[in-house]
Structures are given as structure tokens and as C-alpha cells.
């Protein structure tokens, strides 16, 4: 039982041209990013196979995307088609009453959703967490972000690598930069901090004259004399050193993201001209770029934050 190519082509020709999707066990595994891409298409056509599927020649010539809903085999493509239609529909404005409900769903930013509760407050000796009964919206939001992070780390750690985690982290995230780096552009750094919702950057200046100059010319930065001073002033912070080269002490980006999600205090990303300067301060070392890539520091910072934090409006 294989659908023939000529008849499928006739059916396709009778429709308004669109983006053709074919649910198949041989397709790419469906995820939220694919759903969002499909939801932005003007017209989506779903080809439902049956039994052995459809003629491969039709797939090669006319199918834009072959997708799988999981490592299992169904009788036909009708159930995957229902899944696609339902998941895409949720992203159409007005289908779900509040847009915020969609944003907070599992997978929208890459993480699982937080636990949900309703009345009564106590049921079979199990109680709703007190913070949800407090009426404190700020603390409730903080609890939801923390629980979503913990649930993902416990149940689906594989999701962390592609997740946008900025909204799940502490509000206290900062950059620490070396002022005598020739590539330092503080105006660009301020733009990056604003985009990623970071706090005032720390600027390390070893020379006293340079520190005095910065205090006069740069408002809104925290000026320190050394990385050691940064460490002593930020005893409870998670310090992540962005390294220019890989070594045995470097952490994988996935491990850095996991540590960030687990940490509830301040997070500081440290950038310096070379690794010897980074050795002045204790912290996790993360390798993201080669020393010989001659990019402005602002570009390196943007690349690092995009890989580690991600950001999704």
C-alpha cells in the first residue's frame, strides 16, 4: 500500500500552492521551533500517507518538510496532521485567550512548564505551595521560573542545549570586562546589557589613572582595580570566565547553562584579552572562541551571550 505519485500530484495541483508537509517516521523529529516556523507560513498543506507511505519521487520533488512525531509507527498520517493543526493553531493570535499563556507553555523558550495547581489548597494531605497563595506576583513568578528550570533539568536535560534561558535566571546578571583591552567599546557594551536585561557592567582597570579617567567619563559602570577585587565584592556570585582556548578545565556550554539555571544569586560573565588574565579570578571556564579570531570584543560578548543565554521575545 503505497500512494502513487501521479494521483498525489493531481490532488496537489487542485489546491492553493503552499508549504507541503509530509508526516513520516523518516522525517525530522517535531519540536516547537518547527511548529512556530509552520505557523508563520501563509498556507500549509499536510500530506497524510497510509500504511507504507507515499511514492518517494513525489516526496523528493514536492514535499518541503518531512516530519516525525516520535519513534513509533502509526497506521496513517491523520493523527500527526491533527497534532500539527492543533499546535500551530495555539500560536494564532486570539486562539488562546491570553498570549502570556502561550509564552509560558512548555517548549516555547525551550524549557518545560512549571507545575500547576488549583483549588482546594489542601487535598489528600497534599498542599499547594504557600508562595502561590501569597498573592505576591513577583515571588510567584520567581517560583514558577525556578520550578520550570528544575523540572527541565530533572526530566529533560537534553532540552537545555537549545533553550533560551535568560527569562528563567536571576535578575542579577552582569558582565566584567578589562578596560585596557583595545577592542573595548563601552557604548556597545551598554547596548548589549540593555538587550539581555543585564545589570551595570564591571570594568577592570589595573592602572589608577585609567580608573580615575573612567570614573569621570563612564557613568553607569562599576570600576574595580582587579579581578581579585571583583571576586571579593561578589562572594556569592557564579563567575563564568569566557575563555579563548579549550583546555581540561573548560566546561561545555551545556554544563554552563545547567549551572546558571541552578544558581539563584548573581551571575557574572568575565571577558579578558587572554586566559592568563582570567586566571586571576576563580570561576567556571567556558570555551567559546579561538584566540586567533580577530573579532571586536563586543562581537565576542554578543556571541557568548547568545549561545549561553539565548533570548526570545
Image (cartoon, grey):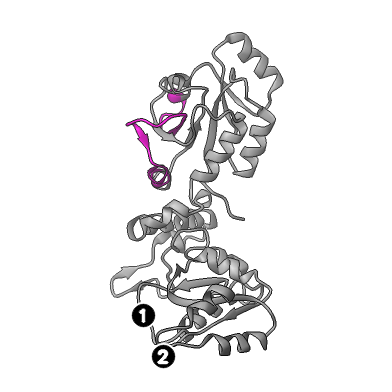
Residue 238 seen in the current view: no
Q: Residue at x 47, y 65 (%)?
A: 106
Q: CA distance from mark 1 to mark 2?
A: 15 Å
Q: Which residue matches tag 2?
A: 1
Q: Is residue 255 magenta?
A: yes
Q: Which residues are magenta?
A: 231-259
The answer to which of marks 1 and 2 sits earlier in the sequence is 2
Return the x and y of residue 107 as percentages of the image width and height. 48, 63
Residue found farthest to the left: 125
In this picture, is 79 found above or below 118? below
Q: Residue at x 60, y 80 (%)?
A: 45
Crowdedness near tag 1: few (<14), some (14–19) or many (≥20) residues, C-alpha within 10 Å: few
Return the x and y of residue 142 as percentages of the image width and height. 48, 53
Which quarter of the image is occupied by the C terminus?
A: bottom right
* Side of 213 relative to 134 (left or right): right
Return the x and y of residue 50 as percentages of the image width and height. 44, 88
Which quarter of the image is occupied by the N terminus?
A: bottom left
Q: Residue at x 37, y 44 (%)?
A: 255
Quadrant assignment, res 303: top right
Q: Nearer the viewer, residue 313 or 147?
A: 313
Q: Nearer the viewer, residue 146 or 75?
A: 75
Q: Which residue matches tag 1?
A: 73
Q: Nearer the viewer, residue 181 or 28?
A: 28
**Image disc number at residue 29:** none
Q: Is residue 6 magenta?
A: no
Q: Nearer the viewer, residue 26 or 74?
A: 26
In this picture, is 157 found above or below 196? below
Helix, strand or loop at mark 2: loop
Crowdedness near tag 2: few (<14), some (14–19) or many (≥20) residues, C-alpha within 10 Å: few
Amino acid at each position: 500500500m503505497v500512494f502513487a505519485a501521479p494521483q498525489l500530484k493531481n490532488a496537489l495541483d487542485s489546491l492553493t500552492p503552499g508549504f507541503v508537509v509530509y508526516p513520516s517516521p523518516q522525517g525530522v523529529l517535531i519540536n516547537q521551533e518547527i511548529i512556530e516556523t509552520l505557523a508563520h507560513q501563509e498556507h500549509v498543506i499536510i500530506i497524510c500517507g497510509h500504511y507504507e507511505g507515499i511514492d518517494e519521487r513525489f516526496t523528493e520533488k514536492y514535499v518541503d518538510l518531512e516530519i516525525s512525531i516520535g519513534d513509533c509507527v502509526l497506521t496513517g498520517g491523520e493523527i500527526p496532521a491533527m497534532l500539527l493543526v492543533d499546535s500551530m493553531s495555539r500560536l494564532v493570535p486570539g486562539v488562546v485567550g491570553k498570549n502570556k499563556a502561550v509564552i509560558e507553555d512548555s517548549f516555547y523558550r525551550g524549557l518545560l512548564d512549571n507545575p500547576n495547581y488549583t483549588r482546594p489548597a489542601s487535598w489528600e494531605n497534599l498542599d499547594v505551595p504557600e508562595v502561590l497563595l501569597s498573592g505576591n506576583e513577583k515571588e510567584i513568578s520567581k517560583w514558577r521560573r525556578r520550578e520550570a528550570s528544575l523540572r527541565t533539568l530533572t526530566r529533560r536535560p537534553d532540552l537545555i542545549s537549545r533553550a533560551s534561558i535568560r527569562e528563567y535566571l536571576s535578575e542579577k546578571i552582569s558582565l566584567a570586562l578589562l578596560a585596557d583591552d583595545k577592542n573595548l567599546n563601552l557604548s556597545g557594551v551598554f547596548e548589549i546589557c540593555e538587550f539581555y536585561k543585564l545589570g551595570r557592567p564591571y570594568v577592570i582597570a589595573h592602572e589608577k589613572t585609567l580608573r580615575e579617567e573612567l570614573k569621570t567619563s563612564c557613568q553607569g559602570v562599576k570600576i574595580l582595580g582587579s579581578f581579585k577585587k571583583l571576586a571579593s565584592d561578589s562572594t556569592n556570585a557564579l563567575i563564568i570566565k569566557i575563555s579563548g582556548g579549550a583546555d581540561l578545565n573548560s566546561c561545555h556550554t551545556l554544563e554552563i547553562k545547567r549551572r546558571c539555571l541552578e544558581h539563584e544569586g548573581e551571575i557574572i560573565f568575565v571577558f579578558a584579552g587572554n586566559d592568563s588574565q582570567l586566571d586571576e579570578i576563580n570561576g567556571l571556564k567556558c570555551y567559546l572562541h579561538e584566540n586567533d579570531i580577530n573579532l571586536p570584543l563586543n562581537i565576542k560578548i554578543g556571541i557568548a551571550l547568545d549561545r549561553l543565554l539565548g533570548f526570545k521575545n
